[in-house]
Image: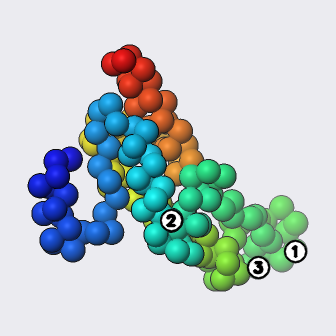
Amino acid sequence: MSASNQQTLAKLGATERPPMLEKGSYVPWASHFMRVLDNKQEDGERMRHSIEVGPYKRKMIQNSDKPDDSKAQIIEPLIKMTESTKKQYFADIRVINFILQGIPNDIYNSVDACKNAKQMWERIRRLMHGSEKIEQ
């Protein structure tokens, strides 16, 4: 993205927007992206955790509609989550959207099938970092 485009976005109040990935600039983009997350305080730490470690995995719990059936389990509903796990769960969703905002359409098509931010990040790294080596 050109300097004038970045200035225009900043003037429009788009300071929350992640940096845009450009061909041949994966390493600086990744560094800048993580710094943007660091500036998001508590939520940023959770989003970084999503990328580096993986998402919160919702537990399977007993279905309260069928208490007699030991095999009747459902995915933990939001209402049953602790505040901490809810925050991580929503940070997992936010960081996926944040990553998608910072990548071009051709990369989006390659990561669309990824289930979480960690998978997306690793696929982007493989796609873009590999292209940097080819260019050099």
The residue indicated by pointer 1 is: 68
What x and y, as percent, mark residue 11? 15, 71
Q: Which mark is residue 42?
A: none
What x and y, as percent, mark residue 71? 83, 61
On the question of residue 109 being in view, the answer is: no
**Residue at image point 40% right, 59% down:** 98
Circle nearer the N terminus (2, 3) = 2
Residue 124, relative to residue 33: is it above or below?
A: above
Left/right of residue 60 with respect to residue 109 in the rendered view: right
Left/right of residue 65 with respect to residue 50 in the rendered view: right
Q: Amino acid at mark 3?
A: Ser
Tell us which disc is closer to us: 1 or 2.
Answer: 2
Distance from the alpha carbon under mark 1 to that under mark 2:
47 Å
Distance from the alpha carbon under mark 2 to that under mark 3:
40 Å
Left/right of residue 136 with respect to residue 88 in the rendered view: left
The residue indicated by pointer 2 is: 38
Circle nearer the N terminus (1, 2) = 2
**Residue at image point 49% right, 44% down:** 120
